[in-house]
Amino acid sequence: MAIPVIDFSKLNSEERAKTMAEIATACEEWGFFQLENHGISEELMERVKKVAAECFKLEREEGFKNSAAVKKMNELAEMKSGEKLENFDWEDVFLLTDDNEWPPATPGFKETMMEYRSELKKLAERVMEVTDENLGLPKGYIKRAFNNGDGYNAFFGTKVSHYPPCPHPELVNGLRAHTDAGGVILLLQDDKVSGLQILKDGEWIDVQPLRNTIVINTGDQIEVLSNGKYKSVWHRVNAKPDGNRKSIASFYNPSLKATIAPAPELIEKANQEMEQVYPKFVFGDYMSVYAEQKFLPKEPRFKAVKAI
């Protein structure tokens, strides 16, 4: 069983209806799919992978070797207790936004990542328009919801991660199982080293490495806006004994001030067959809950957030 792979360029062909249906099925049944022919050049994606790898080597690797996760895992391995390290991830990670500090020492890193983020944000907005259409919502509905109306207030961040070779992968997670808090997530994953898995029908399924595809998944806020039609999906990263897995995940999330609720059109269309099952809340309040409950069951988060 493999997650769907969809040719995004076919939206501009006579196969548009079929492709729209494939995306709708992927969102409904999987919560994850891979896009090929998505419009971002292979040359740019190869440059992104190159500068990310160089950045880890030049600016991050030594810090990771001295990190709490490495120290704790080494201690656990010496004890030979059979326990697993539960509160740490075998991950080196940093976040890029438009206004935070970027790694300064890697040649070409900032220019390349700025170009990539600009292209990826456009792709995210195209994916959201497809989602609008598949849900029967007005064009631009999700983008307006995330931007708290018209404007450019939505958050667009890029998480650059590496999962270095782990001498004891049975003792630690690469990244613990979770759903994503936000909206639409676009991942450029390593095309050689596997590790990402999603939970499907009670079984962990590998997200197969495919060169220069973009892996799309929907977060908790799409689940709310769709009134549960497109559910966010649990996923994790396994630590591996060999290979230094790259992962560059970008998040198109609501503004912290945005009000999120099921789209009224979807409640009305349900003809009372499907009641509104999610509260109306401010996204910043949800993030406060998520920060404490990221790796815990999802449903209590929606109950814990302050409804408005």
Image: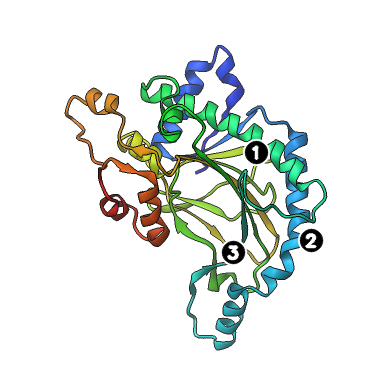
Separation of residues labelled 3 and 1 (CA atoms):
27 Å
Q: Position of residue 180 (x, y in %)?
A: 45, 49
The residue tagged 2 is 58
Assign a secondary structure to mark 2: helix
In this view, 31 is above or below 39: below
The colour scheme of the drawn protein is: rainbow
Assign a secondary structure to mark 3: loop
In this view, 255 is above or below 79: above
Which residue sits furthest top? 14
Tell me if mark 2 has few (under 14), some (14-19) or many (20+) residues whose alpha carbon lies within 10 angstroms of its own: few
Q: Horizontal placement of 265 versus 3: left or right?
A: left
Q: Position of residue 110 (x, y in %)?
A: 74, 45
Q: Horizontal placement of 121 versus 53: left or right?
A: left
From the viewer's side, name the closer residue of 253 and 2.
Answer: 253
The residue tagged 3 is 239
Q: Quadrant of residue 148?
A: top left
Separation of residues labelled 2 and 1 (CA atoms):
22 Å
Q: Nearer the viewer, mark 3 or mark 1?
A: 1
Q: Horizontal placement of 272 versus 12: left or right?
A: left
Image label count: 3
Tell me if mark 3 has few (under 14), some (14-19) or many (20+) residues whose alpha carbon lies within 10 angstroms of its own: many
From the viewer's side, name the closer residue of 137 and 233.
Answer: 137
Residues marked 3 and 1 touching at CB (< 8 Å): no
Name the quarter where the C terminus is drawn: top left
Q: Is residue 212 visible?
A: no
Q: Earlier in the sequence, mark 3 or mark 1?
A: 1
- Give, as a three-letter code, the residue at label 2: Leu
Q: Which mark is residue 117?
A: 1
- Give, as a three-letter code, the residue at label 1: Arg
Separation of residues labelled 3 and 2 (CA atoms):
22 Å
